[in-house]
Image: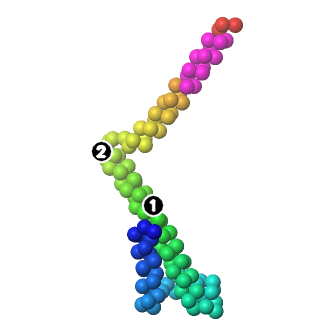
Amino acid sequence: MDKLEEHFYETAANEIATNTMKQGVMAKAFTMAPHDEKAAFAAYIQLRVQQLTEETAANLAASRQKAQEEKVKEYAKSGRRTPEQDRSDMRVGCTFMAVCGLIVLLIIIACSK
């Protein structure tokens, strides 16, 4: 278990200890164990850790996307091209060269007959 996951478990346990559980998560936990309060609390912890993990992953993805967008804007302001744009142009250039080579090869074959 890494430190972040451990922190999520601590958060869920603290929410139970301080009676500050998320209402929707607790309701779902009770539906998973309707007649067993301890099992419901265990389910709450499991559900809450999953929720925190998903939220963190979504926030991280959004942060990376925002950083990428800012990087592109910075490149655009400076008049430079991003490395991604350069790679895209290289792929287009390579494809164009391959097509040209194929056409030349077909012309050579056609002329040799």
Query: Which residue is at a point 47% across and 38% down the rendered structure image?
Result: 88
Amino acid identity at mark 1 = Ala
Residue 82 appearing in the image: yes
Residue most extreme to the front: 1
Above or below: residue 19 compared with residue 6: below
Residue 101 is inside the magenta segment: yes
- List x then y, in percent, for residue 35: 64, 92
Task: Give the x, y percent position of residue 68.
Answer: 40, 53
Three-letter residue code for mark 2: Ser
Q: Is residue 44 above or below residue 83?
A: below
Q: Determine the CA span between mark 1 and mark 2.
A: 26 Å
Q: SS for tag 2?
A: helix
Judge whether residue 77 is colored magenta: no
Percent of width and height locating residue 43: 56, 82
The kind of secondary structure the magenta stretch mainly shows is helix
Query: Where, by quadrant of the figure, is residue 63 drawn?
Result: bottom left
Per the rendered image, the range of residues in magenta is 98-110
Q: Is residue 8 left or right of residue 37?
A: left
**Dot label at residue 61:** 1
Residue found at x 62% / y 14%: 107
Left/right of residue 37 with respect to residue 68 in the rendered view: right
Q: Quadrant of the N terminus?
A: bottom left
Secondary structure of residue under mark 1: helix
Q: Report the residue marked by disc 2.
A: 78
Which of the two residues, 28 or 79, is positioned nearer the viewer here? Answer: 28
In this view of the protein, which residue sits in the foreground, 105 or 51?
A: 51
Other-residue count near label 2 (Cα within 10 Å), few / some / many at <14 / 14–19 / ≥20: few
- Residue located at (35% from left, 46% from top): 76
